Image (cartoon, grey):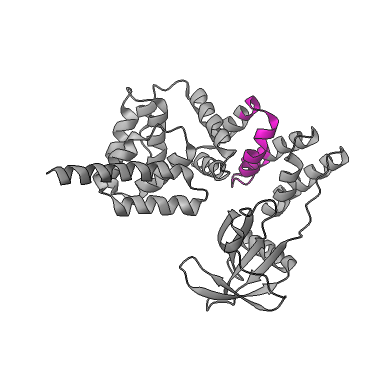
Amino acid sequence: MSDKIINTFQQRRQLEQAFSDLATTTTDGDLREAAKSIVHTFDAAQVLAALLKRLDSPSSQVRGGLGHIAGLLDPEAVLPALRNVAANRGLTPQARLTAASIAHRYLGTELPHVLLADLNDTEEIAFQSLREALDEARHNRHVLLEYVMQMQEHPEEIAWMVMGMLERVVPEERVELLRLIAQDQRAAVAKGALNNLESLALSGTMGAARALHTLRSALADELATQAERSERKARFGGHAYTPPATDGWRALLSSADPNGSQSVWLLRAPEQSEHSGVLLGFVHNELLGLTHFFGAETLDKTLLPQAAPLGHPVTVTMDNGHKAAMLEVPFDFGRWLLAAALATRRKL
């Protein structure tokens, strides 16, 4: 009996640690893998109980992980539990709002609005969530992406509320979030974010002109033109952005598979520390454009493949541990492939 109690206690501690580790992931892929590991490793009832306990987490990163976990559990068990949380006025507003958000985004079920009708000060709750996301983002930029992805699941007025709340934080902290919001599929929201970035760039806010410069490539048609025009205004106003030199960057290209897809890696050797290597990888398909993307900004130099002369093969290790051969190609060609893949994707 004592061994059983000890084993149960150890499993509970392992489960608690697994949930805590959600906050340490740095990419969406890592977050999804952590969620899968939890669901596949522990008892479903225990996982659900642990999930419900954390719905009031101030971390948008953790809340995103909870959503991924909920989406992997039996909806017949998860939905009633989330509905009960949303309806329980004795719980915190954050927990209740998170329960409703997870049900909508990850389970495709809109909970009855009457369950949350008593929550009057939702804007202040939302501001606290925004403030916490901005604080977390100083150490983990992925937090802001998760925040924006959650925001996009809500009606357009929520995006406008978030941009309004950004007026309450210092200008430099607004830039990265506005850059992400500017890529919203809803044109009015994207234009609003671009207008805000233009105002920041014209006032010389650090990073604003750079954000507009990057959005010229990330956006399409009218929005890309707006970003370019705004950057030009900032330049004429004395706040020009000059892209850094590409010294140290290289590109690798795989052979095409039967579907016509090729992997492209853009790499940069560590600069200041041995753990600042960058690897940005994507899959390019002539018909579908960019179909997959991954990246890391804190790689040890030993994890990056050795450089080879242009046109020579390089042996790399894939995620599954298998070895593969890629071709060393000019970095500008790798960048061109990325631009072409994005352009193709936008036309679909």
User: Residue 51 at x, y = what percent?
Assistant: 34, 40
Q: Nearer the viewer, residue 53 or 348?
A: 53
Question: Vertically, is 307 above or below 184?
Answer: below
Give the farthest residue toward the left.
Answer: 1
- Whether residue 37 is visible, yes or no, is yes
Residue 239: x and y, percent? 83, 39
Q: Horizontal placement of 291 versus 118: left or right?
A: right
Q: At 44% from the left edge and 40% from the top edge, which residue is drawn?
A: 62
Tell me which residue sits at (36%, 49%) in the image.
71
Relative to the observer, which residue lies in front, 56 or 234? 56
Residue 254 percent coordinates (x, y): 60, 74
**Image height of 348 relative to 125, above or below:** below
Residue 165: give x, y in percent of width and height: 60, 27
Residue 348 shows in the view: no
Residue depicted at x 62% and y 44% = 180
- Magenta run includes residue 202: no
Instruction: Find residue 256 and report its image quarter.
Output: bottom right
123 left or right of 165 in image? left
Of the 4 image quadrants, the one containing the C terminus is: bottom right
Which of these two is toward me, 136 or 204?
136
Locate residue 145 relative to residue 77 in the image: left or right. right
Q: Seen in the image, is 59 located left or right of residue 192?
A: left
**Residue plotted at (51% across, 68% down):** 318
Q: Is residue 192 magenta?
A: yes
Count of number-bearing discs? 0
By secondary structure, the bulk of the magenta-drawn segment is best described as helix
Image quadrant occupied by the N terminus: top left
* Residue stretch in magenta: 166-193
